[in-house]
Image (cartoon, grey):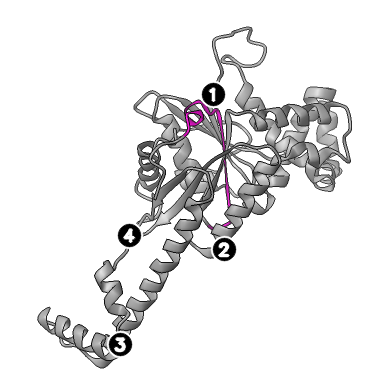
Amino acid sequence: MPSPTLPAEFAGARLHVVTGKGGVGKTTVAAALALALASTGKRVLIVEVEGRQGLSQTFDVPPLGTGEVRLVAHKSGGELWGLSVDAKAALLEYLQMFYKLGRAGSALEKIGAIDFATTIAPGVRDVLLIGKVYEAAGRPRGGRGSGKSSGLHYDAVVLDAPPTGRAVRFLNVNAGVADVAKMGPIKTQADSITRMLRDKRTLIHMVTLLEEMPVQESLDGLRDLADVGLHIGALIVNQIREPRLTPAHVEALSGSDAELDELLRTQLTAAGLRPTNPMVRGLISEGRDHAQRLALQDDMAREIAGAGPPVIELPALVGGIEDGGVAVLADELLEQRIV
């Protein structure tokens, strides 16, 4: 069952990092979380770093570029902006910012030096990617150098992070650059990013399904993330399906085939149907498969409940994320007070 209350630090979080095993709906949940934050009147940025254009598909907008684009203007006055971070573009921006390379940066790209730099040292690539998140999260209202001190440009930032298998290395940027940058601007930026990620106002949320592999990977990932000093937020169980069987049905399915055969034929006949052997056998088989699935879900739910972090449950969307599905999930997150 979902946690009835969430820790007070959830309300003060400024950076929400969303990860999870591939295929669990991580991007959809990140989008719903960002929309939930925007619906409270906040100006929110959601960032993707994997180049899959998952956000453009989720919000049904053209592919995102390297500039921030407004995705939603909410009636509450809040806004949701989107950004897709590209490692090459981030490196070119970085070279211009720190080394004033100008056209020389474009020349480096033409000869393949940018591709080389962003692939030969994965840790440096991650610093460049998260560096954009770091800049956006700390950007003052009015932009850098504006001289204004009236707050931050974005009230909250949501990062659609890489899947669990890569999340620890991605978020533990200091370890990633330790062998290639022991000093200088890259090391300085990695230190700043690490302070941001380990701040109590940064929460790492894990998305999972009630299935053995996602649950086990999620629990392992939570331990690994906590071990490197990151603050765990919620364990979000996605795609919860309403059971089609009552406890009485499940008990009946544990009976013998002969008992079930007789019971189903009686009920089907009473409903005005003519039961056939294939129909009855098929119903018995499907019913038992579903009962087994419910038992497995109950086991997984107990494991999750004992893991420690607050648990948030999101329903399965019958029609997918089309026709306002993300808004439905956002409302669920608001109801469970994750923001």
Q: Secondary structure at mark 2?
A: helix
Where does residue 85 sit, x and y in percent of width and height? Answer: 65, 38
The numbered mark, 2 or 3, whose residue comes first in the sequence reads 2
Q: Which residue is mark 4?
A: 242
Residue corresponding to mark 3: 256
Q: Earlier in the sequence, mark 1 or mark 3?
A: 1
In this rendering, is residue 50 above or below 264? above
The answer to which of marks 2 and 1 sits earlier in the sequence is: 1
Given residues 7 and 88, the one toward you in this image is 7
Q: Are marks 4 and 1 in contact (CB under 8 Å)?
A: no
In x, y percent, where is residue 200? 60, 29
Q: Quadrant of residue 324?
A: top left
Mark 4 and mark 3: Cα distance apart in space: 26 Å
Quarter of the view holding residue 59: top left
Q: Tag on residue 194?
A: none
- The residue identified by callout 2 is 213
Extreme residue toward the front, this view: 306
Q: Mark 4 against mark 3, which lies toward the viewer?
A: 3
- Looking at the rendered structure, which numbered label has been put on residue 154? 1
Q: Earlier in the sequence, mark 4 or mark 2?
A: 2
The mark nearer the N terminus, 4 or 3, is 4
